[in-house]
Image (cartoon, coloured by chain):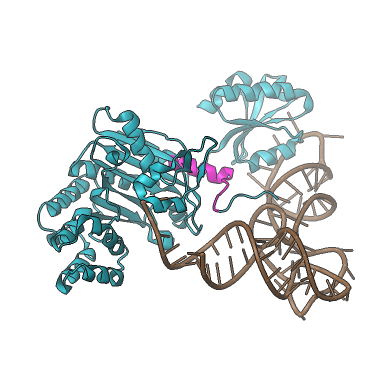
Chain colours: A cyan, B brown
Amino acid sequence: MAQRPRGTRDFLPDEMERRRHYEGVLRRRAETFGFREISTPIFEETELFVARSGPNIVEELYAFEDKGGRGISLRPELTAPAIRLYVNGMSNDPKPVKAFYFGQCFRYERPQSGRYREFFQFGAELIGGSGPESDAEVIALAAAMVRDLGLKNYKVRLGHIGVLRDRLASVGIPGDGMAEILQKLDKKAFDEARPILESRGVGDADIESIFGLVSTVGGPEVLSAVPGEIGEYMGRVLALLDAMGVGDVEVDLGVVRGLDYYTGIVFEMEAPALGAEKQICGGGSYALAEVFGGEPVFTTGFAIGFDRILLAMEKEGLEHPRKALRAYIVPVSDDVRVEAARIVASLRDAGISADIDLMDRKMGRALKHASSVGAEKAVIVGAKELSQGVATVRDMESGEQSEVPLDCLVDHFLS
RNA sequence: GCUGGGAUGGGGUAGUUGGUUAUCCUAGGGGAUUGUGGAUCCCCCGACUCGGGUUCAAAUCCCGGUCCCGGCCCCA
């Protein structure tokens, strides 16, 4: 038997309907914020992802050489391609550029719950705007999207990369030595961070105060631990978010990113119900354009793990509206099939979803089938009806029937 | 990369101290019903993850692979 590659999924019609529905919810929300959709290739030059994330990620990529000897990879994320596209084709657009995207990504990793080798990301980038207003705009979009989806149990955590960077600099850690430490702090691996800090000559009191900072979590009041510009900046972002109806944001100075190009705020959303793979959204502000050879430009963006968030919604028992088939045409006998075909075509041309028996079923079986495919109404077409220029329309839920003149049938379904 | 559990018709399952034709439910196709679905009855369709080994005999025991579920590592 042919089987699917490891870590990939097939989506059956019910699941696909669900996914498209929620995809639409996200798109519409992004559009209400003035973001416009972009799309980039499924594969890119491997170098693009290496430039963003370092040489080690090649291990996790579907990387190969094409027939021209070029190093190519299936995209593992969409931020780098989006910024590449901005540098290539949108850098002269009026600022800020507001772009969103949705598509599949690929990572060669061990699959587990909420982690697949082919997965879907929805993300947005606001390019060319700096300041708390831009940051708040992006976070508000992410929060509104999750709210629109209907997910109840989730948390938004806001941090700022500068808090720890400044503190580390003040205790004598050079810029190029920070990434390693930040990575440990991000994971709250204090026992691993301590020896590194000690070896750099950082005293115990400073180490404890750094660990204390990383562990600072709470409402806006905890910003008192962050005096100066950054504290003010974060307070401003929170105030703007509050004004935009996003009040449930937690300040968490332990939200860190190890990578150098993060420049300011960082934020995450998580759905605790998901267990090990609970992060459903990650974002922040960064300077990536220059990494790809463009002019420096402020950017804030985020990416939502579409599969994970759907998983979380499923655990909460969320139901999406079903698309019902409006009409199922039941030809009573073979001699009316041509007329029945004419009727089904007229409904379809009017934009009404309509199906017709193709299995040569007898009437009783055809009605049964109409019921099992979830048709709202059956349109019974028989010699008796046709001789009077009508069809019998049966409501499949109530069983009520009425005769409708053939030339009024389309209107009957439109009203 | 490490580690625990698992895999029986399309879906859900019984059977696993080796022993007839592998159980049941559901879904699907047809009939009972020559113009009225959801009920009932009947018929049909359809499975032991793959490869090797032990044995007179393997769904069942052993070894290896694949895939799935969970945890660790990683997570741009």
Locate residue B12: give its quadrant.
Answer: bottom right
Q: Is residue A68 left or right of residue A298?
A: right
**Viewer-side residue, A224 vs A388:** A224
A13 is within the stretch colored magenta: yes
Q: Is residue A318 visible?
A: no
Residue plotted at (28% across, 52% down): A267
Residue plotted at (74% across, 25% down): A337
Above or below, A181 relative to A407: below
Q: Main secondary structure of the magenta part?
A: helix
Locate residue A100: give its quadrant.
Answer: top left
Residue A99 picture location, percent across and down: 33, 35
Q: Is residue A281 left or right of residue B46?
A: left
Residue A276 picture location, percent across and down: 42, 63
**Viewer-side residue, A332 vs A302:** A302
Residue A235 picture location, percent across and down: 15, 52
A331 is within the stretch colored magenta: no
Above or below, B66 relative to A201: above
Point out the residue furthest to the front here.
A69
**Viewer-side residue, A65 vs B39:** A65
Residue A19 picture location, percent across and down: 49, 44
Start-end of magenta stretch: A7-23
Q: Is residue B51 left or right of residue A326?
A: right
**Viewer-side residue, A35 vs A245:** A35
Point out the residue furthest to the left here.
A228
Locate residue A102: give its quadrant.
Answer: top left
